[in-house]
Amino acid sequence: MTLDELVAKLQVPLAKISGVHRLMRYLAHIGFFDVVRIQENQEEKEAYALTNSSELLVRGTNHCLSSVAEWVLDPSILTSYHHLGKWIHDDGDQTPFALALGTGIWDFLSKSPTHMRSFNDATANDSQIINLALENHGAVFEGLESIVDVAGGTGMIAKYLSETFPHLKCIVFDLPKVVENLSGSNNLSYVGGDMFQSIPKADAVLLKWILHDWSDDDCIKILNKCKDAVSNNKKKGKIIIIDIVIDNGRQDVFDTQAKLQMDLIVTTYYNGRERTAEEWKKLFIETGCHNYKISPLTAYVSLIEVNL
């Protein structure tokens, strides 16, 4: 699309066209868009094209992350980062998010339907990417008859699993407010509850982007509830974790940068943390989970199988 086509499509006022050009020049320089030459009416013109990065924001695709971007860039959410200095000098346990908005993120979401909807849309967008990655990891679900997606939101991953493995009974487990109006199918159901109290029984428990939201002490509590959920079965259960593993500089510098940025994000919002392989190992040992395997799922996240 040429600059003229772009400003016409966006209905940009004449006085702002120069600003749009300078913005696109910057975005092209950092690789978010590409600058190409096209033929139009027998004349060669400069135009902008999508790159792998900008294609991730195209709505209606199975790899769209536009809702994630909208959530992260929400003005009220962004105020959290302005309180990092205050948080560092504060001797309490409040997050920068709580210092900025006067309440923790989960309480904030429960009282703001608009932000809760935005948050759920963002997690659903992310789950689409995870589903694409899981296509090559079907073996992790072999032999399972049931699985609980803990804090599974609207159930994007569970829907994928229920369709891909029709024999697999999938349960989406989340707070009652999240799942109360959602309907399942033959092998997909929604259950409301609190993962710190109990988790529905199943052969396996899935934790996607869950443990990085919590402190080590809380993670141990969650993992113990997961162990309770998959115990007392005739066959050994497993816990499947999809989360970041920081590799201490042994990987691509940009991948590591993204992981360290996420570490700051979960610190700001939740008092959570991203963990190295050694820190994951410590968590597993403290919960008696000695049989585990860490495998790359994408360049960004890993697949951790904990077999009990």
Image (tube, rainbow, N blue to C red):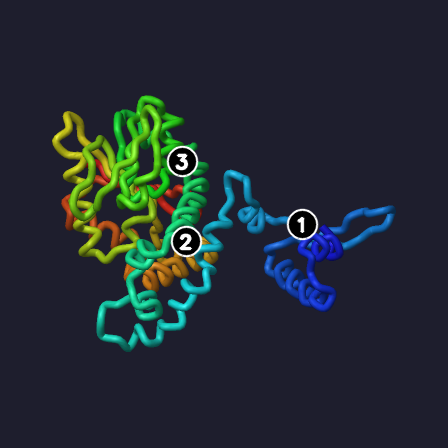
Residue bearing the label numbered 1: 49
In-front residue for pair 243/157:
157
In-front residue for pair 150/16:
16
Q: Which mark is residue 140?
A: none
Rendered location of residue 41, percent (x, y): 86, 46
Residue bearing the label numbered 2: 114
Instruction: Confirm whether residue 294 shows in the render.
Output: no
Q: Which mark is residue 134?
A: 3
Q: Amino acid at mark 2?
A: Thr
Rendered location of residue 55, percent (x, y): 57, 47
Residue name at image x 32 percent, y 62 percent: 267
Q: Secondary structure at mark 2?
A: helix
* Relative to 173, residue 115 above or below: below
Callout 1 crowding tier (Cα within 10 Å): few <14, some 14–19, many ≥20: some
Q: Secondary structure at mark 3?
A: helix
- Mark toward the start of the polypeptide (2 vs 1): 1
Q: Secondary structure at mark 1?
A: strand
Inter-mark Cα distance, 3 to 2: 30 Å
Rendered location of residue 12, percent (x, y): 69, 60
Inter-mark Cα distance, 2 to 1: 33 Å
- Mark toward the start of the polypeptide (3 vs 2): 2
Single out the residue that lies furthest toward the top: 167
Instruction: Confirm whether residue 11 shows in the render.
Output: yes
Determine the image quadrant of residue 217. Answer: bottom left
* Relative to 229, residue 123 above or below: below
Residue name at image x 35 percent, y 37 percent: 182
